Image (spheres, rainbow, N blue to C red):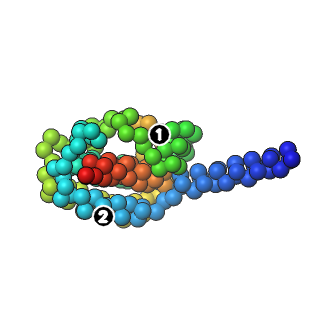
Amino acid sequence: MKRRIFLVVIVLFIFLFTFIHFRMNQSDPTVLLPQLSQIEDTIEFRDEKNTEISEADVAWHLDHTLKTINRITEVLQASDPEIFEGTSFNFTKMASLTAGFIPRGKAQSPQSVRPPEIILTEDIFKQLTEARKNIETLQNLASDANFDHPVFGMLNKAQTIRFLEVHTDHHLKIIADVLRP
């Protein structure tokens, strides 16, 4: 009986490790394309706001999400894969990127990805076009291209793409809740 329990625990551990490794190392940036389509579909609701859900309006979330994709792509492009030493263990990173979840209201956006006071619809469309081009750029970057996240630490290309997917989904969920009647 003990041996059977031990084997089940080992099999579960192997499954969990494999699942975590797979989720943290997907490197296909095209996973972002459906999310960009969702962003485009919600631009018409840019002025909607529900302070019970978020202090910011829909335009803020759209602008911030697109800035995040575009600025992080620039950082990955400028990084030096030759000096990348690998990522260290970070429980918060592992849990968030594996589960695909970022808790609401727990972190503040860096200044570089905060929207301006006045967000123009044409600027959102320009950033959307830039984000679509950046997906192509991401495909061609070295796997050791890297980005130093303020909470998750050093991320390689695959982990950064996963972060962008989770982060974008986080804001799309907030938008959906704002727009829910």
Splitting the image into 4 quarters, where does residue 89 fall? top right
Q: Amino acid at mark 1?
A: Phe
SS assignment at label 2: helix
Splitting the image into 4 quarters, where does residue 117 fall? top left
Q: Which residue is pictured at 51% across the width and 38% down the height?
A: 92
Residue 56 place in picture, x, y as percent: 23, 41
Give the left or right position of residue 36, taking residue 28 as reference: left
Q: How many marks?
A: 2
The residue tagged 1 is: 152
Q: Which residue is pictured at 23% across the width and 39% down the height?
A: 51
Give the left or right position of residue 88, taking residue 73 as reference: right
Q: Amino acid at mark 2?
A: Ser
Residue 83 visible from this viewpoint: no
The residue tagged 2 is: 37
SS assignment at label 1: loop
Q: Are marks 2 and 1 in contact (CB under 8 Å)?
A: no
Nearer to us in this view, 77 or 13 = 13
Disc 2 versus disc 1: nearer the observer? 2
Q: Which residue is pictured at 35% across the width and 36% down the height?
A: 105
The crowding category of the residue bearing disc 1, from other C-alpha atoms within 10 Å (few below 14, some 14 to 19, many at least 20), is: many
